[in-house]
Image (tube, rainbow, N blue to C red):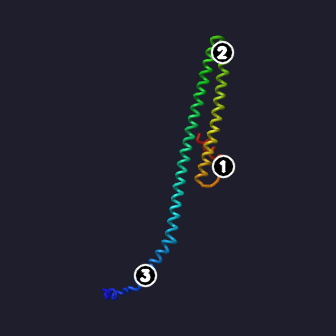
Amino acid sequence: MMDVLNNIGFDWQVALANFINFLIIFWILKTWVFGPVEKIINERKAKIAEGLEQAQESEKELLHAKEAATNEIKRAKSQANQIMAEAKDTADNQVAHAKDKASQEASAIIEKAHSQIEKDRVHMEKDLYEKTAGLVALGVQKILHEEVDESKNSEISKRALEVLAQKQ
């Protein structure tokens, strides 16, 4: 067997030296290259997963804020309807006593209710914009993993409010 290997030019000493060199290079690569590269890849995967999780949490918070705003608007409409109903009842009762006086008072009450509804709506929209901008800034801060100072927060909030205003 050795004669056949020697005839084709196989030298077992060179083969052994090559095998030892291979083991040394493999150990060096595994220790100094593959290990750190694998660590970096795993860290990046963890950061990406964390970023996606935070983005999902931010989306849930935004959805919850939208639901809360919708509920607040419904409540305001209900109150407005109640105010309108009360104003109408008051006007109907006064019509029985004095038609002219009741007509004037009903108009004033309805106008006041509309004005109050408009003020409440504007106030609620402003609150919604501010809360949404705050959530967007918080989401951006979490996603970017950096502190957002007052100027950045103001800029992000301003841009978010502009985008929200355009969508309405």
CB of mark 2 within 8 Å of CB of mark 1? no
Q: Which residue is mark 2?
A: 102
What is the three-letter code of the residue carrying label 3?
Answer: Asn
Amino acid under label 1?
Asn
Residue at the (50%, 65%) spot, across then down: 38
Q: Position of residue 163 (x, y in %)?
A: 61, 45
Q: Quadrant of the N terminus?
A: bottom left
In the image, farthest residue toward the right: 151
Q: Position of residue 2 (x, y in %)?
A: 32, 87
- Give how far apart the Cα atoms at labels 3 and 2 are: 109 Å
Mark 2 surroundings within 10 Å by alpha-carbon count, few (fewer than 14), some (14 through 19), many (20 or more):
some
Secondary structure at numbered mark 2: helix
Q: How far is mark 2 from mark 1, CA to CA?
A: 53 Å
Tell me where residue 89 sits by quadrant. Answer: top right
Q: Is 127 placed above or below 145 here?
A: above
The residue that mark 3 highlights is: 18
Front residue of this view, candidates 110 and 58:
58
User: Which residue lies under the disc numbered 1?
Assistant: 153
Q: Secondary structure at mark 1?
A: helix
Which is nearer the N-term, disc 1 or disc 3? 3
